[in-house]
Structures are given as structure tokens and as C-alpha cells.
Image: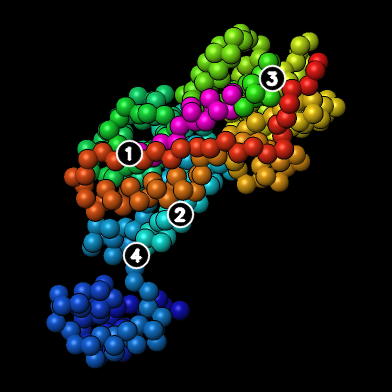
């Protein structure tokens, strides 16, 4: 069946096509002199025919696509889904759609995604762009987008140097609290599963971990820092490496909850009880963290709130391009659950 057009609506309502255009585009509130009777006739014809305005044509006329772009680092990690959920919730509440892209933790592919979005008609872009720090090409594209006037917001876990609005949730202070908590439980050998695609992604956990050990008079032992990739399997293998040491750690910090899930499985496969034999802490507080056995002690940054705040910033920039640079800090918090306990006597 042929899709109804404005001409069809105009014919049924007995008005001009221009009148139909004014009504469906909301231009009758005093800006165009159209009577309420005429407006109602047009709306009735729209309903009767099932006419739907062409969004592409509308965006070309208005310059507004009602679309927000979002780039996340790794679609496999539920932590980033929650960022996307927050963005989508706030965008939808404000009458916008979300266009989601995943860079798959691959810098070359990330550059292509960034270029592709820069060519698309979107009203603004939110990105978790630690890959930008590793890519001169991405920095160039970011500069071009900024000069073009595209509103940009970064969701970041560290202070960034390029001049865009950002929402930051730095784990540094929370990691100090994590270390103080484990030390209060008498843990002396604390391992770290440092599973990242690029080092900058978790420096706010590595540095306070090292500083916390030194402040307690304990050495920073490189054998207790298991460097690996970001997947559950990586966390599993890294935990096996740490737990098979002759003098194994009594506590392990994983820089995200996915890695901690792998570590939990590794402990079980080695016959270790969590938390009696091993305390385990993750980061991000993904939804499944509180349903594991035992429930996972973790650090939450309220990712849904972070996503919503990013959209609010973006809309504020759209409405007022001359605003000074906007910065929002969402402080994380330590959530103590069942996976941590007093250090065992080895």
C-alpha cells in the first residue's frame, strides 16, 4: 500500500499542502494564522490516513535530527550497557533517539567509527573515549567536530585535556577506601587483576593500590599485579596465575566486575572459599554483582546516573553553545557485600 503523503492529507482535509505542513510541524501557535477548526480537520485527516511525517525530510528542513550519538568501548561489558541505558532514558524523556556504536576496544576500528559518526547527521555526541588518548587521528577528528560546533560530552574516569564538556567518575578516592578496608581486615598480600585494553582505563585504580601498600609499609610486588585483557576468561586466567603463587594473595582486587567474576570461578576451581580463604573486590557494580554467590563487594559509580547527566550536559550545550565548559563529578562508593572478610592464616 502506498504510504500517505501530505498531499493526500491536504486533499482529505480540503486544505493546501502548505497548511498540512504548518500543522504537522507545529507552526500554528501564533506563527502561522491557521484557525483551530482547520487545524483539527488536518489532524483528523492525519489520523484517518495514518500519515507519519518523514523524519529525514523534517531534519533537513529544521537542521535538527533528534538523534544523539553514543560511543561505548566494549559492548560485552554490562557496565557500559548501564551507561547506555542512562543515556537512552534521558534522551527519550527529552524527545531524542540514541544512535549507539561500539568501538570493540580496537583503536583502528574506533577511528573508523568516529569518522563515520562525524559524517552522520546527529545533534550531539557522547563518547567514552579513552581511545582518543591513544590515537592522533581520533584527536584530529575530535578537533574538527568541535570546530564544526557539534555538541560533545565525554564520560571519563580521569581529567582530560581537550576542551569538551565531561562527566567524570574517578575511582581514585574509592580505591583508597578499598585499600584501607582490606588492610583493616589484616590482609597483607593483596593482588590486583589489571585487565585493560589501554593502561589509561584503570590508572585511577592501579596508582592508589600501589600507594596504599606503600603507606602501610608493604612492598609493591609486581608478581601480585596480573596484567591481562578485559574479559571474564582473562580474569579467570589472571586469578589462577595469582592463586598458584607459592605465597598467594589473601585478597584480590579486580579492576572491573567481569574480571572479578572470572576470579571467583578460579578460586572455586582451586578449592578456595570466598571469603574464608580469599577476599575479592570488583568495580562498577554491574547488576549481576549482587546475585553472585557470594554477593560481590564492589565499587559503584551509578552508571545510569552518569549516562543521564551526560545527556543533560549535551542538551544544555545544544540550547546554549556559548556556555563555559561544563564539568560534573559523580563520586563512586564502596559497597561491602559477602565476598570480603578477615584475612586467613596461611
As drawn, the residue found furthest toward the right would be: 271
Q: In x, y percent, where is residue 298?
A: 61, 36
Residue 90 visible somewhere in the drawing: yes
Q: Does residue 263 appear anywhere in the picture?
A: no
Q: From the viewer's side, name the closer residue of 3 and 245.
A: 245
Residue span colored magenta: 166-180
Q: Which of marks 3 and 1 is nearer the N terminus?
A: 3
The residues tagged by marks 3 and 1 sit, at their Cα atoms, a distance apart of 37 Å
Residue 138 falls in image quadrant: top left
Q: Say which label, 3 or 4, has the lower sequence index.
A: 4
> How many C-alpha atoms fall within 10 Å of the one at disc 3: few (<14), some, or many (≥20)?
many
**Residue where numbered disc 1 is placed:** 327
Asked if residue 32 is positioned above or below residue 116 in the image, the reply reads below
What whole-number distance in Å separates the C-alpha atoms at marks 4 and 1? 33 Å
**Are the residues at dot 3 and dot 2 in contact (C-beta closer than 8 Å)?**
no
On the image, the x and y values in percent for residue 310 come to 38, 46
Mark whose residue sits in front, 3 or 2:
3
At 50% across and 37% down in the image, what residue appears? 332
Q: Provide the residue designation for mark 3.
A: 187
Q: Earlier in the sequence, mark 2 or mark 1?
A: 2
Does the magenta segment cover residue 20? no
User: Residue 31, percent across and down?
Assistant: 15, 75
Is label 3 in a helix, a strand or a loop? loop
Pick whichever of labels 3 and 2 is earlier in the sequence.
2
Badge 4 is on which residue? 55
Read off the residue under disc 2: 88
Give the Cα separation between the discs numbered 4 and 2: 19 Å
Q: Is mark 1 on a helix, strand or loop?
A: strand
Quarter of the rendering occupied by the N terminus: bottom left
The circle on residue 287 is none
Amino acid at each position: 500500500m502506498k504510504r500517505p503523503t501530505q498531499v493526500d492529507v491536504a486533499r482529505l482535509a480540503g486544505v493546501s499542502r502548505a497548511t498540512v505542513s504548518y500543522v504537522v510541524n507545529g507552526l500554528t501557535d501564533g506563527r502561522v494564522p491557521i484557525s483551530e477548526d482547520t487545524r483539527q480537520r488536518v489532524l483528523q485527516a492525519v489520523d484517518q490516513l495514518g500519515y507519519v511525517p518523514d523524519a529525514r525530510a523534517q531534519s533537513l528542513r529544521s537542521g535538527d535530527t533528534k538523534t544523539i550519538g553514543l560511543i561505548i568501548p566494549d559492548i560485552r561489558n554490562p557496565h557500559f550497557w548501564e551507561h547506555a541505558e542512562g543515556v537512552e532514558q534521558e534522551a527519550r524523556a527529552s524527545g531524542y533517539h540514541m544512535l549507539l556504536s561500539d568501538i570493540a576496544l580496537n583503536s583502528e576500528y574506533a577511528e573508523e567509527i568516529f569518522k563515520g559518526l562525524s559524517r552522520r547527521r546527529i545533534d550531539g555526541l557522547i563518547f567514552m573515549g579513552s581511545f582518543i588518548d591513544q590515537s592522533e587521528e581520533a584527536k584530529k577528528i575530535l578537533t574538527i567536530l568541535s570546530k564544526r560546533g557539534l555538541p560533545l560530552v565525554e564520560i571519563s574516569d580521569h581529567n582530560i585535556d581537550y576542551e569538551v564538556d565531561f562527566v567524570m567518575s574517578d575511582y581514585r578516592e574509592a580505591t583508597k577506601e578499598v585499600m584501607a578496608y582490606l588492610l583493616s581486615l589484616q590482609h597483607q598480600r593483596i593482588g590486583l587483576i589489571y585487565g585493560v585494553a589501554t593502561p589509561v582505563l584503570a590508572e585511577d585504580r592501579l596508582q592508589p593500590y600501589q600507594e596504599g601498600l606503600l603507606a602501610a609499609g608493604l612492598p609493591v610486588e609486581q608478581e601480585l599485579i596480573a596484567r591481562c585483557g578485559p574479559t571474564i576468561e582473562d580474569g579467570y586466567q589472571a586469578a589462577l596465575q595469582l592463586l598458584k603463587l607459592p605465597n598467594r594473595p589473601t585478597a584480590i582486587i579486580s579492576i572491573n566486575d567481569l574480571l572479578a567474576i572470572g576470579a571467583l570461578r578460579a578460586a572455586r576451581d582451586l578449592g578456595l572459599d570466598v571469603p574464608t580463604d580469599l577476599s575479592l573486590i570488583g568495580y562498577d557494580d554491574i547488576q549481576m554483582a549482587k546475585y553472585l554467590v557470594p554477593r560481590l563487594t564492589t565499587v559503584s559509580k551509578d552508571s545510569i546516573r552518569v549516562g543521564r547527566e551526560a545527556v543533560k550536559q549535551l542538551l544544555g550545550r545544544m540550547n546554549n553553545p556559548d556556555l563555559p565548559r561544563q564539568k560534573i563529578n559523580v563520586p563512586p562508593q564502596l559497597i561491602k557485600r559477602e565476598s570480603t572478610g578477615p584475612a586467613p592464616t596461611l
